[in-house]
Image (tube, rainbow, N blue to C red):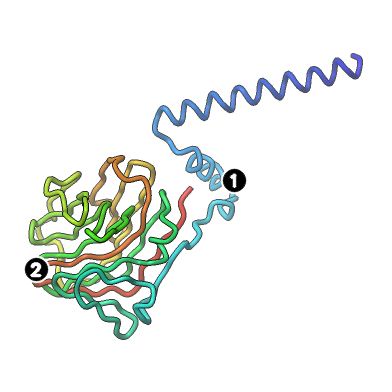
Amino acid sequence: MHSHERGQGFVEYALLISLIALTVILALQMMGVSVGKAFCDVAAVINLTSVCSPKVLCEDSFDSLANWKTFYGKPVTTNGKICLDKGTQVYNTCSMNTQRENYTIRLENALLYQGNGYGIFFRTVYNQKGANGYIFQYDPGLQAFVIRKWVNGKEIWQPIAKTPIPNGYPIYNTPHNVEIIVRDNLFTVLIDGQQVLQAQDDTYKEGGIGFRTWDHTEFCADRIAQFSIP
């Protein structure tokens, strides 16, 4: 075979491989599978997880409120905790400034002492009227875990997703780790590593994180972090 024929063969192989790869990517997308996640799943099998390790985008151990903007209420920090009582809304300025689309939120040792619950904003922005975005509510007032939308500072009462809190669940005076995975139009909530709720919506494409409390709530948490996801 002449050199130009060999070169032509390599080009044809490359085109064929590219076509196969494109077909696989399109098929994955049609099935709702993240290409990045699929790549990382393969990387995990061959022990290359470091290439897909999540990166910390924003985090706070609550030594102060320097990274938080208060919209309502009087949040306080004490002994490395943030504590909120009734009628409080605060937003993490780091996450608000970057306004990313896909990420994971991890809240550590979230502790509800009393009241009807607390909420974690995600993919949220705020203006003079208030929040526009989504919120996960740990909501014993409704005896449920809930995801809602907010529009111009007002919650839309009809939830995007809602599931009852199980009977006997340790609601009060028990620390829980809460994780919210925000990927495209799919939102997944885990508490202490167990999935409790999932919702789909595509109204808001990007935004940051925050907290909300209401009624006679007393709530504290140790640390919050926002991580990248594939």
- Name the kind of residue labelled 2 in the image: Asp
State the SS at label 1: loop
Q: Is residue 220 above or below residue 91?
A: below
Residue 37 versus residue 151: which sits nearer the camera? 151
The image shows residue 197 at horizontal and vertical percentages of 23, 49
Instruction: Choose the circle earlier in sequence order: 2 or 1.
Output: 1
Name the image quarter holding the N terminus. top right
Task: Name the quadrant containing residue 34.
Answer: top left
Residue placed at 26% from the left, 53% from the top?
132
Q: Which residue lies furthest to the bottom in this view?
A: 79
Q: In this view, does 134 lie to the left or right of 35?
A: left
The image shows residue 122 at horizontal and vertical percentages of 31, 55
- Name the kind of residue labelled 1 in the image: Ile
Question: Mark 2 or mark 1, which is nearer to you?
Answer: 2
The CA distance from mark 2 to mark 1 is 51 Å
Q: Is residue 188 left or right of residue 73?
A: right
The image shows residue 223 at horizontal and vertical percentages of 35, 72
Residue placed at 21% from the left, 65% from the top?
212
State the SS at label 2: loop
Q: In this view, does 205 lie above or below 92?
A: above
Residue 46: numbered disc: 1
Residue 215: numbered disc: 2
Q: Residues within 10 Å of mark 2 (few under 14, many from 20)?
A: some
The image shows residue 168 at horizontal and vertical percentages of 11, 61
Count every numbered label the image shows and give the total: 2
Q: In this view, does 31 lie to the left or right of 176?
A: right
Residue 178: numbered disc: none
Give yes or no for contact between labels 2 and 1 (Cβ–Cβ under 8 Å): no
Residue placed at 46% from the left, 51% from the top?
229
Q: Is residue 172 above or below residue 209?
A: below
Residue placed at 41% from the left, 55% from the top?
99
